[in-house]
């Protein structure tokens, strides 16, 4: 982009262009690309455990892990008794009671903890993928806004130049030098420039509003700094970027961890059919009005019990069906992880080849622009030496404008492809924050 700007500065309207740019910069709140990315991340809340999905997954992991800690419950079961004191909700009637239970040996609980931990890691990778998506959105919006802003400044100058050409052509027609059809040609060229200017203005307004929504800044005061955009890296076509993307891509990592979580969950469901040991304890303060002293010979108010609880499931068809269901879900999740790897690998290779094609198209557009610029300079020399016509100069200027627009579009397409490829290879955030 800076190379193109240096070539444009050689045109005759250099002073007018710089005046417009300086006026725009002083009126707008200019932010750098790095600042735009930082504001986007903070405005969206994508920092640490602020992500609700990640917080939920971490809470699920703590729930499974804390199964080995004692769970204390206190309360009372106050009520009258007629005859022998029967239980109230599986507990003896009491003035006050405390119960405690915790797992000591449970193969299923161990697998449940591993499953929850893998689920938490999957949520973290998903959060990273969402973070990269926000960064990509902010970067592309910033780059495109910068592109349209620069082109809009040039187009405004071109509109003024074409208006002057229309006035000159009208004078030549009135003097009988040119035919009236020449005025229509000049008006057509002016209309094309105004159409491009309207497109640039509309696109710039949309990009500015979107960047304002991402960063939380006012849209009417938002401007870009071209010098804050770091140079995009060149990607070698013989480099195995597809393999690299599979190794570091957050979406692939999330799918892999999700598959591991489902596999541990299925393992836990099957291990629920194995023996387990819990520790349980209870204290209760009993009352006389529940007839304990009538039916119990050595009744006392304070009572406590504690010990180990062994469980040995030997027939549980419901649990076996649940385990089979979890196994099928684990198989499906594993296949989804493989599909995610293949998708990322294929998309990375496609982007790698597209970057090469777009780089070639930029080179072609650059040569076409250079050629049109040379033809314009030659036409201007002929006009000054009175060996050429204004019509030739206008045609040459129109070719310069068209070739410049094509060059800008080609550079933008190449930048978008490179930014997307940076995201696939896990280097987008480092690149975006490497600027000023």
Image: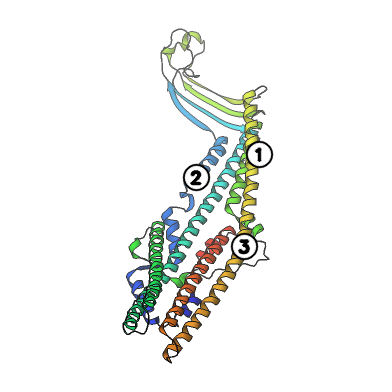
Q: Nearer the viewer, mark 3 or mark 2?
A: 3
- Comparing labels 1 and 2, the label whose residue is closer to the camera: 1
For disc 2, the marked residue is 53
With respect to residue 237, does 343 lie above or below? above
Q: Secondary structure at mark 2?
A: helix
Q: Position of residue 14 (x, y in %)?
A: 40, 81
Furthest toward the bottom, the residue is 385
Q: CA distance from mark 1 to mark 2?
A: 23 Å
Question: Where 292 falls versus 251 (above or below)?
Answer: above
Residue at mark 3: 352
Badge 2 local density, few (<14 within 10 Å), some, or many (20+)? some
Q: Residue 228 versus residue 410: which sits nearer the camera?
A: 410
Q: CA distance from mark 3 to mark 1?
A: 32 Å
Residue at 54% x, 33% y is: 70
Q: Is residue 428 left or right of residue 148?
A: right
The residue under label 1 is 331
- Name the one closer to the observer, 138 or 74: 138
Sequence-wise, the earlier of marks 1 and 2 is 2
Q: Are marks 1 and 2 in contact (CB under 8 Å)?
A: no
The local secondary structure at tag 1 comes to: helix
């Amino acid at each position: 982009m800076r190379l193109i700007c240096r070539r444009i500065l050689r045109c005759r309207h250099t002073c007018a262009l710089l005046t417009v740019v300086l006026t725009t910069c002083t009126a707008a709140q200019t932010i750098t690309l790095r600042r735009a990315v930082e504001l986007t991340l903070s405005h969206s809340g994508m920092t640490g455990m602020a992500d609700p999905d990640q917080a939920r997954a971490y809470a699920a992991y703590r729930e499974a892990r804390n199964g080995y800690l004692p769970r204390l419950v206190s309360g009372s079961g106050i009520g009258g008794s007629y005859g022998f004191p029967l239980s109230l909700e599986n507990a003896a009637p009491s003035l006050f009671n405390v119960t405690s239970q915790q797992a000591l040996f449970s193969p299923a609980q161990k697998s449940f903890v591993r499953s929850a931990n893998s689920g938490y890691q999957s949520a973290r990778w998903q959060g990273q993928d969402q973070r990269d998506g926000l960064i990509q959105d902010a970067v592309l919006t910033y780059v495109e806004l910068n592109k349209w802003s620069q082109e809009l400044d040039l187009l405004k100058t071109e509109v003024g130049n074409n208006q002057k050409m229309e006035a000159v052509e009208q004078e030549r027609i009135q003097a009988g030098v040119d035919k009236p059809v020449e005025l229509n040609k000049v008006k057509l060229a002016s209309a094309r420039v105004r159409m491009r200017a309207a497109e640039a203005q509309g696109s710039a307004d949309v990009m500015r509003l979107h960047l304002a929504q991402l960063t939380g800044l006012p849209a009417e005061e938002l401007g870009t700094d071209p010098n804050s955009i770091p140079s995009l890296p060149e990607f070698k076509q013989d480099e195995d970027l597809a393999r690299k993307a599979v190794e570091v891509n957050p979406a692939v990592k999330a799918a892999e961890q999700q598959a591991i979580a489902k596999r541990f969950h299925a393992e836990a469901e099957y291990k629920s059919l194995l023996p387990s040991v819990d520790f349980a304890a209870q204290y209760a303060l009993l009352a006389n009005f529940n007839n304990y002293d009538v039916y119990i010979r050595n009744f006392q108010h304070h009572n406590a019990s504690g010990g180990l609880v062994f469980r040995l499931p030997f027939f549980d068809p419901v649990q076996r069906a649940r385990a089979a269901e979890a196994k099928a879900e684990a198989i499906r999740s594993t296949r989804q992880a493989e599909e995610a790897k293949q998708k990322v690998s294929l998309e990375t290779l496609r982007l790698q080849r597209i970057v090469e094609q777009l780089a070639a198209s930029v080179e072609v557009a650059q040569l076409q622009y250079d050629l049109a610029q040379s033809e314009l300079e030659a036409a201007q020399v002929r006009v000054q030496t009175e060996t050429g016509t204004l019509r030739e100069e206008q045609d040459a200027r129109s070719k310069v404008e068209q070739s410049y627009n094509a060059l800008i579009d080609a550079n933008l397409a190449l930048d978008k492809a490179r930014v997307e490829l940076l995201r696939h290879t896990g280097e987008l955030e480092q690149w975006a924050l490497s600027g000023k």
